[in-house]
Amino acid sequence: MSTRDAYVEKLKAQLDAWNAELDKLEAEVRMAEADTKVRSEEHIQELRKKVEETRQMITRIGEANEDAWKDVKEGAESAWNALKKSFTRAKSEFVRGYREGMDE
């Protein structure tokens, strides 16, 4: 397996893990109060959109020729890090908002 293939597989595995986390968050949101639920659903949809954009980027990396993929990888890493921060921040906000909604 080439370095590029291993890199693509690693990114795909992380996206799959994040999708599973989003599924769990959606289940929690279904039990939340109405105002918390609306905000959370909007955040989840935005994250799903970013995940799909990242999945498309991974596809481009996998399709790039051996010489070009390293150039594509640099831009991809920047986008990947932004997605990772967004996911972590959103997950934290969901959990906090959900818990606050349950305390009311």
Image (cartoon, helix red, strand yellow):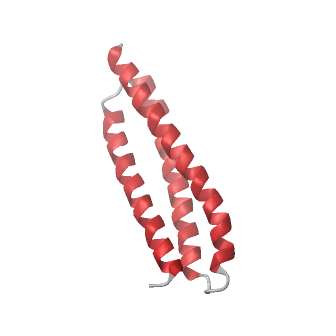
Q: Is residue 101 above or below residue 79?
A: above
Q: On the rendered image, what quadrant is the C terminus found in?
A: top left
Q: Can you see residue 46?
A: no
Q: On the rendered image, what quadrant is the N terminus found in?
A: bottom left
Residue placed most toward the observer, 103 or 10? 10
Looking at this view, name the residue that lies furthest to the top. 104
Q: Is residue 17 above or below residue 68?
A: above
Looking at this view, name the residue that lies furthest to the front. 3
Q: Residue at x 53, y 78 (%)?
A: 4
Quadrant in the picture for residue 69: bottom right
Q: Residue at x 43, y 26 (%)?
A: 97
Q: Residue at x 67, y 65 (%)?
A: 75
Q: Is residue 30 above or below residue 35?
A: below
Residue 100: % across, % down: 40, 20
Quadrant in the picture for residue 16: bottom left
Residue 2: % across, % down: 49, 84
Q: Is residue 88 left or right of residue 80?
A: left
Quadrant in the picture for residue 101: top left
Q: Is residue 26 above or below residue 77?
A: above
Q: Residue at x 54, y 70 (%)?
A: 58
Residue 79: % across, % down: 62, 57
Q: Can you see residue 73?
A: yes
Q: Is residue 75 left or right of residue 15?
A: right
| Number of on-image labels | 0
Residue 43: % across, % down: 50, 39
